[in-house]
Each structure stands twice: as structure tokens, then as C-alpha cells.
């Protein structure tokens, strides 16, 4: 496949990664079909463009869209129940596998030649090595189990339908459209208020990637990824969580004294999360553009502009 102008479909297009992917794809001259939940308040996250077609459809109803559009590359990012409280909702997570297969069938009905599914680091469980396609999986949550199964089943279906298939296991992404409950956004808003955040000991070794880079990686996989491969999306650079927290603090208010260890780790806390991006870079020529400090500075400016009281 060439990298000429493509028509790209995205489910879950109003979320942080989806909306950023839509923006970057549009900036590179592609057309975008953004599939979002009906009435979603996050539709405002999407860029305004004559090259963007908005399609409102619930994840349960993809079959109703068969044959209504045409696209070259189909990105499936939508997923029901991603919050901590919903990740072990076995029935809902099992339904997500079906929804992923529905998305493959929708992609086929629209003439897509490429399908990229969004997996998760949760498919690996707890490991102490850099994550790549060859690392054995051992998911512990219903969410991780369902993501792994969805990836395997959708790969089989894509092969049957002669669609190029790639699975992207996404690590920790942060950005302007991040949810308030994430550590990065919690840190930024708490520090901007001049308050001391509650923190664990922050001894994890972690890999954070800025949303623009994560979306850029997904787009590169869609355009140039190798059929049948699984790619881990991360920066490929790992640091102690404590260092990330200190970097955010130094950008916002270095006078605030951080209180590490004031709260306990979550049960089953992952202590090592780092992507091996060798195959991603070799196959697609993708390289992250933003350092953590550069990305955080952009997010802080965005939060300040959106919240004048901070």
C-alpha cells in the first residue's frame, strides 16, 4: 500500500487517541470517517474539517452501517467498559470480542484492505522485560483476556476476508484529551492548584508516550505495518515513575514538595512497563517526535487555557 491520500475509518474516534489520530490523518491529507457513540459529549474533541465524515453509531450496532461508506484503512479503537470498575465485568468484556468481529465485518463491507485493532499492555499481565510480539501473554484482568482474544479472533477473520491485519498493543498514553482520573492529568490539575498530590512510592519502571506520537504510530501501522504482526506502541524509553512525577512538578511548580508513599499501590500493580519498538520503527519508519517534558508542557498549556481558574 502506498501512502497516497487514503480514506480512513476510526471507531472510538472521539476518545483521546481516536480524536488525535483523526487530526493527524487529516493534517497529512487523508479523509476520515469518525464513528462515535450517538450523542457523545466527546464529539467536540474531533477536528472540524470538510474531509471528516461523522457517523453516529453505538458499538452494538455496527451491522446497521454495512455498505454505507467506503474506506481503505479501518482502525478499531472503540471498547466498552474500560474503567477500572468495568475491566472484570466478564459479560461485557466477552461482548467486546464480538464487537471487534463486528468491526472487521463492517470494514470488509466498506471495502477496507487494512484493519488495525487496538490491543493493550494488559494482554501481557505482569512481566519484567520489554514488551514485544514475542513476549508470552498472561492477562490477569477480564479486559486483558478479552483484548487478547479479540486480537486473535479478528486476525483469523481478516485472513479469511483477505484484509491486511495488524494488532497494536498500546501502553500508557497521555495527552490534552486525557481523562481526569489518570495519574498524569491528576498530577497536572492538582499541582496547578498548588496542592500536594497523593502518590505511591512510584517505584515502577514505566513507558509514557504522548498522544500525538501514539496516534502517529497507529497511522504508520495502518499505512505500512506488516500483515499479521502485533506491534507495541510506546516511546521505547523507560524511566522510574518517580522521575516522571518530578518532571511534571518541575514544569508546573518545583516549590511543591512531593509526598511519595502517601498511598498504597493498587492491587496487582504492574511494576515494569516498557515497549520494545524495534519492529515498529523498522517496519513503519515511525519514531516518537516528543520527549516527555515536551509533551507535558503542551498538556499543561492546554489545561491552563481550558481552566482559567487553575
Image: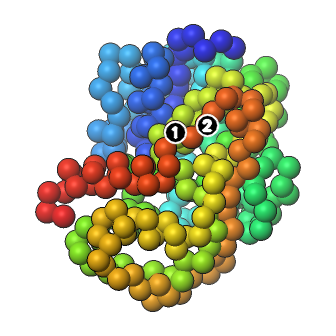
Determine the CA span between mark 1 and mark 2.
6 Å
Q: Quadrant of residue 51?
A: top left
Quarter of the C terminus within the rendering: bottom left
Residue at 85 percent across and 49 percent down: it is 134
In depth, the one of 302 and 102 nearer the eye is 302
Residue 271 location, quadrant: bottom right
Element at badge 2? Answer: loop
Q: How is the image coloured?
A: rainbow
Front one among 4 and 196: 196
Residue marked by disc 1: 289
Q: Position of residue 37 (x, y in %)?
A: 41, 40
Q: Is residue 265 above or below residue 275?
A: below
- Residue 260, disc: none
Q: Going by the image, does 272 lie left or right of 81?
A: right
Report the residue at 58% width, 30% height from top.
219
Residue 25 vertical position relative to residue 86 in the rendered view, above or below:
above
Question: What secondary structure is marked by label 1?
Answer: loop
Q: Residue furthest left?
A: 309
The count of marks equals: 2
Q: Nearer the viewer, residue 216 or 160?
A: 216
The reply, left or right, for residue 14 in relation to residue 213 is: left
Image x and y of residue 276, in percent: 73, 50
Question: Crowdedness of circle 1 by 10 Å Cα count: few (<14), some, many (20+)?
Answer: some
Residue at figure coordinates x 67%, y 42% from the top left: 168
Query: Pointers 1 and 2 in contact (CB under 8 A)?
Result: yes
In percent of the image, x 33 and y 40: which residue is there?
45
Q: Residues within 10 Å of mark 2 (few under 14, many from 20)?
A: some
Q: Is residue 37 above or below residue 250?
A: above
Residue 224: x, y in percent? 69, 24
In the visual, does 295 lie left or right of 89?
A: left
Mark 2 lies on residue = 287
Amino acid at each position: 500500500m502506498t501512502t497516497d491520500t487514503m480514506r480512513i475509518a476510526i471507531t472510538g474516534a472521539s476518545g483521546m487517541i481516536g480524536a488525535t489520530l483523526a487530526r493527524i490523518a487529516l493534517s497529512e491529507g487523508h479523509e476520515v470517517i469518525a464513528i462515535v457513540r450517538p450523542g457523545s459529549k466527546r464529539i467536540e474533541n474531533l477536528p472540524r474539517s470538510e474531509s471528516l465524515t461523522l457517523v453516529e453509531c453505538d458499538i452494538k450496532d455496527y451491522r446497521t452501517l454495512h455498505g454505507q461508506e467506503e474506506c481503505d484503512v479501518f482502525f478499531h479503537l472503540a471498547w466498552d467498559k474500560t474503567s477500572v470498575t468495568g475491566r472484570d465485568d466478564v459479560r461485557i468484556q466477552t461482548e467486546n470480542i464480538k464487537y471487534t468481529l463486528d468491526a472487521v465485518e463492517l470494514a470488509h463491507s466498506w471495502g477496507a484492505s487494512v484493519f488495525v485493532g487496538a490491543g493493550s499492555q494488559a494482554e501481557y499481565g505482569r512481566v519484567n522485560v520489554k514488551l514485544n510480539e514475542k513476549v508470552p501473554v498472561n492477562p490477569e484482568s477480564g479486559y486483558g483476556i478479552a483484548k487478547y482474544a479479540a486480537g486473535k479472533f479478528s486476525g483469523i477473520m481478516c485472513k479469511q476476508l483477505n484484509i491486511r491485519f495488524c494488532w497494536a498493543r498500546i501502553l500508557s498514553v497521555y495527552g490534552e484529551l486525557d481523562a481526569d482520573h489518570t495519574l498524569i492529568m491528576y498530577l497536572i490539575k492538582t499541582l496547578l492548584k498548588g496542592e500536594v498530590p497523593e502518590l505511591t512510592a512510584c517505584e515502577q519502571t514505566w513507558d509514557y508516550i504522548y498522544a500525538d506520537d501514539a496516534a502517529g504510530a497507529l497511522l504508520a501501522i495502518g499505512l505500512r505495518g506488516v500483515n499479521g504482526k502485533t506491534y507495541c506502541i510506546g516511546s521505547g524509553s523507560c524511566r522510574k515513575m518517580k522521575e516522571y512525577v518530578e518532571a511534571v512538578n518541575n514544569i508546573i511548580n518545583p516549590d511543591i514538595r512531593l509526598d511519595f508513599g502517601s498511598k498504597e499501590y493498587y492491587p496487582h500493580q504492574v511494576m515494569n512497563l516498557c515497549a520494545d519498538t524495534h519492529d515498529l520503527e523498522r517496519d513503519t519508519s515511525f519514531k516518537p517526535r516528543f520527549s516527555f517534558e515536551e509533551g507535558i508542557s503542551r498538556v499543561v498549556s492546554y489545561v491552563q487555557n481550558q481552566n482559567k481558574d487553575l
